[in-house]
Image: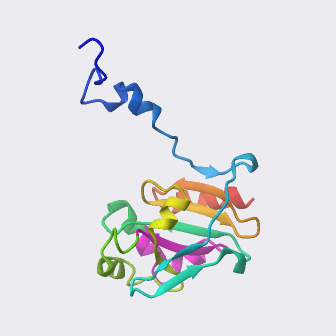
């Protein structure tokens, strides 16, 4: 109807200018020096409920933050790749951290099951980290330079090859 704020085609949200205006591009690849934003320490709990912190100032190598969910078909490949330290080997000299939503948002036991094969990679449950790094979906990967404490790369992960490409491009 004339004067209505409803989209012309309710089945297509892209026909709604207000919806489209709220979209932001999905970053993929290195972040240019002028667009880099501050990186925050990762603070939360591990799947057993123990406090855990990843302090960027204590690290020398770039840090890959893997934002994963427990009920996500696309995340299974990444959980598996984190198992037995394989991702860290493939991404050397990058340190790897898995980040899930916090205990108020996801079931701790499910996170423990998803992370059961993960060794040598901290698993941090933290809603704050998702907010700090502006992560709105998963699987999502953020590369941080701990020396400058800035985000230097981001990508949606469709496979480990996407993540390795982003890491190589951002570290070169």
Q: Is residue 93 a member of the stretch shown in magenta? A: yes
Residue at 58% in and 55% down: 154
> Quick one: 100 or 94, which is closer to the camera?
100
Q: Which residue lies furthest to the top in this view?
A: 2
Out of 125 and 32, give the one closest to the viewer: 125
Residue 112 versus residue 2 in the image, above or below? below
Span of residues in magenta:
78-101
Q: How has the structure been colored for display? A: rainbow
Instruction: Determine which quarter of the picture holds residue 22.
Output: top left
Q: Where is residue 9 in the image (x, y as percent from the top left)?
A: 26, 23
Name the residue located 28 percent from the left edge and 20 percent from the top edge: 8
Residue drawn at the location 37% of the way across and 29% of the way down: 14
- 169 up-or-down from 41: above or below: above
Does 18 sit left or right of 163 as displayed?
left
Query: Residue 61 appears at what percent x and percent y?
Result: 71, 74
Who's the residue at 40% across and 72% down the image? 102
Measured along the vertical axis of the image, is residue 43 above or below residue 159?
Answer: below
Where is residue 80 drawn, in percent x and y? 41, 74
Please state, as top left, top right, bottom left or bottom right, where the C terminus lies in the image: bottom right
Q: Where is residue 134 in the image (x, y as percent from the top left)?
A: 52, 55
Number of callouts in the render?
0
Q: Which of 72 and 56 is in front in this view?
A: 56
| 169 in the magenta segment | no
Residue reaching furthest to the front: 3
Quarter that holds the N terminus: top left
């Amino acid at each position: 109807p004339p004067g209505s704020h409803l989209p012309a085609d309710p089945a297509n949200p892209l026909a709604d200018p207000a919806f489209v205006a709220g979209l932001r591009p999905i970053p993929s690849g290195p972040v240019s020096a002028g667009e880099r934003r501050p990186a925050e320490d990762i603070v939360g709990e591990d799947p057993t409920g123990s406090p855990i912190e990843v302090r960027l100032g204590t690290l020398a190598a770039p840090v890959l933050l893997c934002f994963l969910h427990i009920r996500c078909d696309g995340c299974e490949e990444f959980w598996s790749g984190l198992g037995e330290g394989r991702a860290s080997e493939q991404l050397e000299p990058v340190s790897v951290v898995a980040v899930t939503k916090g205990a108020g948002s996801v079931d701790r036991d499910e996170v423990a099951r998803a992370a059961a094969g993960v060794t040598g990679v901290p698993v941090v449950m933290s809603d704050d980290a998702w907010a700090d790094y502006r992560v709105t979906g998963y699987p999502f990967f953020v590369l941080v330079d701990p020396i400058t404490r800035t985000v230097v790369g981001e990508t949606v992960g469709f496979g480990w090859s996407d993540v390795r490409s982003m890491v190589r491009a951002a570290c070169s």
